[in-house]
Amino acid sequence: MKDHDASAQMIDTIRSAQARSAKLRISGGDSKTFLGLGTSGETLDSRNHSGILELDPTQHWIRARAGTALQELSATLDEHQLMLAFEPPAFSNNATVGGMVATGLAGPRRPWAGGVAEHLQGGSLIDGTGQMRHFGGEDIPSRLVAGSLGRLGVISEICLRVRQKPRQSLTLRLEISQSLALHQFHSWMRYSSPLSGSCHTGDALYLRLEGTPEAVKRARSLIGGEETSDSLWDDLREQRLSFFRDPRPLWCIHANASVPQRKLPGPVLLDWGGTQRWLKSAEPTLVIQRHAQALGGQAICFTPDGCAPGLAQLPEAEDMRALRKQLDPQGLFSR
């Protein structure tokens, strides 16, 4: 396990860039550059700033430096039968904890467990003036740091709430259409069922049940279907399913769950019970956005240089813009 505090070096790098009015590009594992994070500016590498600082298995929290490998943090939690409930995707063995927080991406359990922001208890970052700032309070809310894409500064340390692994997990497969899957899903949500994952690959609906053996057994009896491997959820999270191998650009559409399925210009994979819809399409951006708006949401491109906008090109919220100007007045981290 690598344990190294590189905060002093990162502060020096930021202050040097500030003095020269140079731009900085924060780099960790570079596993999510397809989000449109940009490649211009001098590189500030956070990987040397690493190490798990504290873990409390009884109070369910962990504290780590931002350059810590996500793989290492997950393995440490696994030793204690703990997990990050929001299932962050890595997309690479090089993914870091800081990048996980900065991008704010979550996996299949997101609708039931919450996202990064709901599990980020606090931490620290180095702002555009080279000052160490603590977040998690009123001045710098954790919800703005999660998904901030490095615009507020370099994340230094984070404290995350973790969860005990479920006593039992079971995946069911049902051969029904996507339209029927959306209808059925809303019906199941009315029951006190231990659902923690719902996706339709285009061929079949997959449901994950987690909880006590008794609760899983009751839900299994209610839903029906056939049992299949739990590995599907890892493959969905890391985009290893055959759906993602289609060469066309990949779009992520966040939709209103109450809006019924409608025909989209390409194959669709339903995730999060239908509130997240993956689309493979070579249609122009404006066409995709119109379809997304009809679903009550917006579309984000997940393909490098294949389409736009990526996550980094979406408009900033007003409170985020104000905080960025406060923490990075010179725009060192602007994209």
Image (cartoon, rainbow, N blue to C red):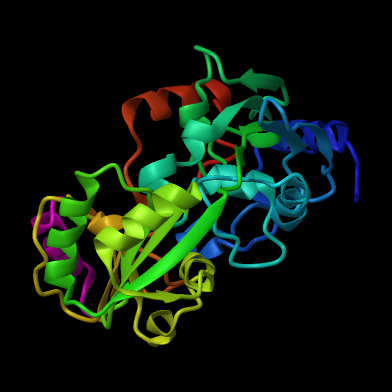
Q: Residue at x 69, y 59 (%)?
A: 29
Main secondary structure type of the part rendered in magenta: helix
Residue 311 visible: no
Residue at figure coordinates x 57%, y 20% from the top left: 136
The image quarter in which residue 5 lies: top right
Rendered view: 236 above or below 7: below
**Front one among 274 and 81:** 81
Q: Start and end of the magenta stretch? A: 283-296
- Residue 221 shown in magenta: no
Name the side, left or right, on which 261 lies relative to 228. Answer: left
Would you say 285 lies left or right of 315 here?
left
**Which residue occupies the foreground of this view, 11 or 166?**
166
Q: Is residue 251 above or below residue 212?
A: below
Residue at left offset 53%, top offset 55%: 168
User: Looking at this view, is 307 or 198 the one in front?
Assistant: 198
Q: Give coordinates of residue 163: x percent, y percent.
A: 59, 39
Q: Is residue 264 shown left or right of residue 131?
A: left
Give the image location of residue 218, x and y in percent. Answer: 34, 53
Q: Is residue 260 visible?
A: yes
Residue 44 coordinates in the image, percent (x, y): 73, 48
Q: Residue at x 16, y 79 (%)?
A: 265
